[in-house]
Image: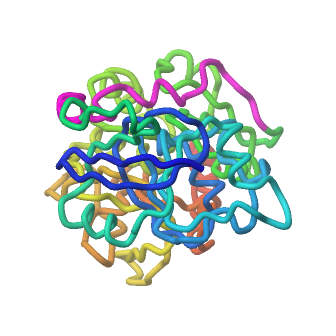
Amino acid sequence: MSTAFLVLEDGTLIKAKHAGAKRDVFGEIVFNTSMTGYEEAFTDPSYAGQILLMTYPLVGNYGIRKKNFESNKVQIRGLILKEPCFFAYRGMHLDKFLDLSKVSCLYNIDTRALTLKIRKHGTMKAMIVAHPSKMDYHALLRRIKQTPYPDAENLVAHVSCTKKIIHGKGPSRFVLIDCGVKSSILKHLIKHGTVIQVPFDTDIKTIDRLKPDGIVVSNGPGNPALQAILSTTAKTVEKLIDKYPVMGICLGHQILGLVLGFKTYKLKFGHRGSNHAVKHVCSQKIYITSQNHGYALQAQKNLDAEITWVNVNDGTIEGIRHRTRPVFSVQFHPEAAPGPRDTWFLFKEFSELTICQNAKT
């Protein structure tokens, strides 16, 4: 293990130890407060473009097992830890996983202090410097400041599937618009029917030919209001809501919100963890949810949709529903993985909604 540095765009320079791939990494630094689920976090496509800071210290203590992956590869650009566990009684050891996955990791960092800095000043661009002997600090800082945030590019295009994939053999047919879907979402949908996974930029005619009973717009990374998303996914969803039941999750929720007239904005430091409390507006019940997002819908009067869920901590919108169509979305992750199972029922609710709608037609 060698010495390395973390450089933030505000000029902060932090000395650390290095593990994994010996390479410099640029990204947006964000923090996750979960005490478990690091395997899922590393492989969650919603983290594309980001350097992940884990606030809980004992990452690696139960090993790495591929069955817990949320995609077929590691999605984070880099990793920041306080006290990693390079040993485990089962699964692959963390250090070996970092090497094989070519992940650049810094550790022995005061992650509490760094998290408090991000909470105060917001997420920042950052660089992991694995070769400090070659570092020109001032030149590097200029480079970090001049480089756009990763979400200025179409990150969805990097994590979406490139062709149609069919899962399961159930009687109901769900078309899943893949913006960076987690494997756990697929597992839940397959329980209720056949899932036809399609690329994020699939057009309405192609989806119509698949004869779906319902549409799911998945989670994913980046800015939902990016022109590359508005001109593809959002354009298609706008046409779909008049024809099929639709469910949006995380980025899918934001895209659906844009279609229904909401605006989006970037949160100061986002919601990333497995203990976020949300309130169901109708029942006033509180549910604990898993979340991973940096953007949110802006509250405003809207004739087509009503707010159905709100965040208990900061009041941000956590769910919406169309007033007349079988269309709804949630900002949190009902599949959890990791996290509480409080909102698993939403997958069943959507399945029943598609059956009910098809019975009417």
Measuring from the top left, give residue 35's x and y in whole percent. 56, 73
In the picture, measured across the screen, residue 361 lies left or right of residue 309, that is right
Q: Quadrant of the C terminus?
A: top right
The magenta region covers 141-167
- The quarter of the picture where residue 332 lies is bottom left
* Residue at image point 24% right, 37% down: 137
Measuring from the top left, give residue 289's x and y in whole percent. 50, 70
Measuring from the top left, give residue 274's x and y in whole percent. 51, 69
Q: Is residue 248 above or below residue 179?
A: below
* Residue at image point 71% right, 46% down: 97
Q: Is residue 88 above or below residue 282?
A: above
Measuring from the top left, give residue 49's x and y in whole percent. 42, 37
Q: Is residue 216 visible?
A: no
In the picture, measured across the screen, residue 358 lies left or right of residue 90, that is left
Q: How is the image coloured?
A: rainbow
Q: Nearer the viewer, residue 288 or 129?
A: 129
Q: Is residue 12 visible?
A: yes
- The quarter of the picture where residue 72 lies is top right
* Residue at image point 67% right, 62% down: 60
Q: Nearer the viewer, residue 46 or 196?
A: 46
Q: Is residue 58 above or below residue 323?
A: below
* Residue at image point 82% right, 57% down: 91
Query: Would residue 147 be counted in the magenta stretch?
Result: yes
Query: Would residue 48 be counted in the magenta stretch?
Result: no
